[in-house]
Image (tube, rainbow, N blue to C red):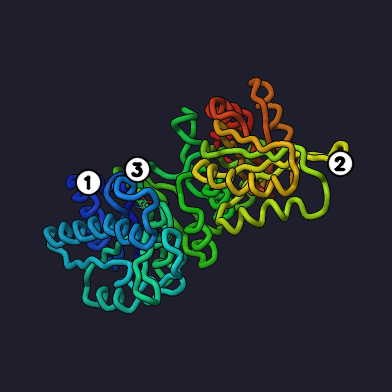
Amino acid sequence: MDLIVQKYGGSSLADAEKIKNVAGRIARAKEAGNSVVAVVSAMGDSTDELIELASQVSDSPDRRELDVLLSTGELRSCALVAMTLMSLGHKAVSLSGAQAGIRTDSQFGMAKIAELDPQRITNELDKNKIVVVAGFQGITPDMDTTTLGRGASDLTAIALAAGLNASRCEVYTDVEGIYTADPRLVPDAAKLDEISFEEMLELASYGAKMNPRSIELGMVYDTPILVASSFSDAPGTLIHGEVDMNKNVGEIRNRVVSVATDPNVAKVTVQGVTDRPGIAASLFEPLAAEGISVDVIVQNASAGGKTDLTFTIKREDLARSEDVVRQVAEGMDSDKVVSSTGLAKVSVVGTGMQDAPGYASTMFRALADEGINIEMITTSEIRITCIVSEEQMGEASRALHAAFDIASPR
Ligand code: ASP
Ligand code: MG
């Protein structure tokens, strides 16, 4: 008997009808002879609604209390799914993150899973029950409820799949899998049958709607992840470690697997800083201490002993970053601090790029031909990212998708 962990996202559980659909799918997996653990997200946009509600009663809601509040979204859906399964004639039980044995550190809102004690889950599975687990939450050694970060029900599912040694983790959502580009921006984007963990990690970190930490976990524990639609029986995309690399060998254009786009970018520039050892450290240390993660960093060649430092961050971190940077910049007698939003990242990702020349030039040419200005550039071994204006994000992704001929199978 196979053990399968399934995960259903909020849009698949948005109302009673959708919950019945999900329960039907879980029941089918069980009836096919599997042991099933189902991890569920909060219904629809209810996490956003809870955050909004909290902001109506407090300007800066206490982080511990906010986690108690947010955890209720997933509790609601797991109880409803368990009830529905019972009405379909199955044995089922809902478990909170704590009951499921998900132990975390005490970083409210962004807790890390420290340990998994799957005893209760295995006991319930042994009783032939379908176990429905509330995603996105855990418990600290002090028995405080924590949440694991936005979109982290995926993380719960993959952690359980790894910890229970499941044969795979199936992530069900409102799209049919991972695409060669965002289909809302690029009409001829195609669904991928498979993708490697490394490529998916880059895509998730640069805009694809999956939690990057969950991909990392799948990679570390070598747990294959199937991403598929909860509304159809289309086969989905398998994220795994055994993608046939020979497929990527060949012409340049066949080695890029996908274009990722992310409009959540803000930029801060510190102008006219005296160029001396330690300026970057004194700027980025306080940002790190504030928990702000900085993405692309560019330091200009200095002229007359002065230089400019520019970096990007998520938009929601802009106000906090400006506060930090203004304070530090005073001590560095910089000329001024300027910031902007309205930017986006477009990235091309593909494992085959690392040992072939010509990718960067192809990318820059494609953008230039569309009259798109590149503000900043950053690369990894298997990714090239350009910062462009948000208005041109769609155009840029269409141009790259065409230039690398990504829609045709590799
Ligand atoms: N409900 C949480 C969120 O919206 C977790 C998740 O959906 O995975 O971020
Ligand atoms: Mg959600």
Reading the image, the residue beneath label 2 is 305
Q: Quadrant of residue 370?
A: top right
The numbered disc on residue 406 is none
Which amino acid type is marked by label 2? Gly
Which amino acid type is marked by label 3? Asp
Residue drawn at (74%, 47%) of the image: 332
Q: Nearer the viewer, residue 396 or 320?
A: 320
| Residue 297 visible in rendering | yes
Reading the image, the residue beneath label 3 is 174
Q: Nearer the viewer, residue 67 or 223?
A: 67
Q: Position of residue 335 (x, y in %)?
A: 74, 37
Dot placed on the residue nearer the N-terminal end, 2 or 1 = 1
- Give the class, few, some or many, for how many residues have Cα within 10 Å of label 2's Cα (few <14, many ≥20): few
Which amino acid type is marked by label 1? Lys
Helix, strand or loop for disc 2: loop
Reading the image, the residue beneath label 1 is 18
Q: Nearer the viewer, residue 389 or 63?
A: 63
Q: Nearer the viewer, residue 231 or 212?
A: 212
The residues tagged by marks 2 and 3 sit, at their Cα atoms, a distance apart of 54 Å
- Give the class, few, some or many, for how many residues have Cα within 10 Å of label 1's Cα (few <14, many ≥20): some
Dot placed on the residue nearer the N-terminal end, 2 or 3 = 3
Helix, strand or loop for disc 3: loop
Residue drawn at (39%, 72%) of the image: 140
